[in-house]
Amino acid sequence: MSKAIAKTGVVTAAGAMSGTSLDGVDVAVLRTDGHSITAFGRSSYRSYSPQERSVIAAGFGQWHGPNVDAAAKVIEAAHLEILGDYTDVDLIGFHGQTLAHAPRAQGTLQVGDGAMLAERLGVPVVWDFRTADVELGGEGAPLAPFFHHACARYFGAKEPVAFLNLGGVGNLTWVNPAVAEPHHEGALLAFDTGPANAPVNDLMQERLGLPFDKDGAVARGGTVETGALELFLAEPYFARIPPKSLDRNDFAEMVALVRELSDADAAATLTAMCAAGVAEAMQHCPSPPSRVLVTGGGRQNPVLMQMLAVSLDCPVVPVEKVGLDGDMLEAQAFAYLAVRVARGLPTSCSGTTGVRAAVGGGSVSVPSVI
């Protein structure tokens, strides 16, 4: 018999996330009814080897072909390995790996076969979260905002707050916790701020053979090239009204802007570009947030956090300050969204992706046998 998903009440879900920064797979457990967060559960992390990272990266920007197929195999194998320890949950939210994202053109592509994972793991899997949103005119990203709204209400926020996720790409969610449902008018505004860790990670890999700039050590020794920064901020993307989203490689020319700079100056300039993109983004908020809660790998870079503190007009703190786990928030988000999909609840709306109407994305694959 297949394992049915309860249609009411609190259930236990695991979410799995592999981001564009290509560090690895995060898995986190959440107890929720699809509306409120009841409790946070265990979590774990499985890093990618340099070879795995190289295979996945070779598929970036491609929609089909051998590189895409090879990346999918790596993603599936890594997820099977780590999710094998989570077969006691009621369902799994599987994001897959975004290789290409062009919502106004080809669409969006996250590789990884959720139906195969469901069969192999014996647990229902919710996957392909973004396609339905794009098909209805949305950006397909970001998708964590509905979870951010639940988080703000979970920790008792009384006034608007902003969640800033600094992964490969940066994205901002402005939340008004006074609005009860995330898809209701005035509850959320969300969009990508610009490149975040991806350009710096690429620079570190290319020049120093390092996966990222640990603790901002390289950037700390450099000087920001203001000319390159000004060219970056002249990009038309920053003038666009949100919601709006980016592909990991949309700002690939950033690395070209710093190519003649020293390692330290290049790292400092790319880090400053991330902070400047966020400062530009804050101007779009419906009202100033009481604070900015930073999640993702970028919050562990003290140079970037200092740049943000100087650039923004409100406190900038890691999400740990409100009792959340900044390493696992994205994985938790897909656990939460999985429950909403399984129960027919919306996962995005006009304020988060620009979609024409609130929509619940995702496919549900139930294993044939347990």
Image (tube, helix red, strand yellow):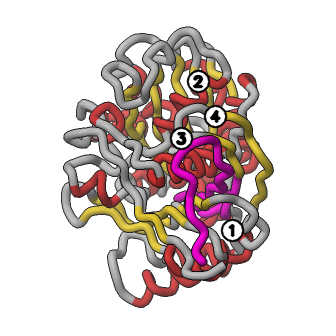
Query: Would you name the residue on which mark 3 appears?
Result: 34
> For the residue carrying disc 3, how many other residues have a C-alpha within 10 Å: few (<14), some (14-19), or many (20+)?
many
Query: Would you name the residue on which mark 2 appears?
Result: 152
**Residue type indicated by callout 1:** Gly
Circle nearer the viewer, 1 or 3: 3
Can residue 109 be seen here? The reply is: yes
Which disc, if any, is residue 37? 4
Which residue is pictured at 42% across the width and 90% down the height?
A: 66
Q: Classify 184 as above or below 25.
A: above
**Residue type indicated by callout 4:** Ile
Which disc, if any, is residue 235? none
Residue numbers of the magenta segment: 1-28
> For the residue carrying disc 2, how many other residues have a C-alpha within 10 Å: few (<14), some (14-19), or many (20+)?
many
Circle nearer the viewer, 1 or 4: 4
Disc 1 and disc 3: Cα gap in Å? 42 Å
Q: Secondary structure at mark 2?
A: helix
Query: Would you name the residue on which mark 1 appears?
Result: 209
Image x and y of residue 100, in percent: 37, 66
Which residue is pictured at 36% across the width and 41% down the height?
A: 348
Residue 135 falls in which quadrant of the image?
bottom left
> For the residue carrying disc 1, how many other residues have a C-alpha within 10 Å: few (<14), some (14-19), or many (20+)?
few
**Residue type indicated by callout 3:** Gly
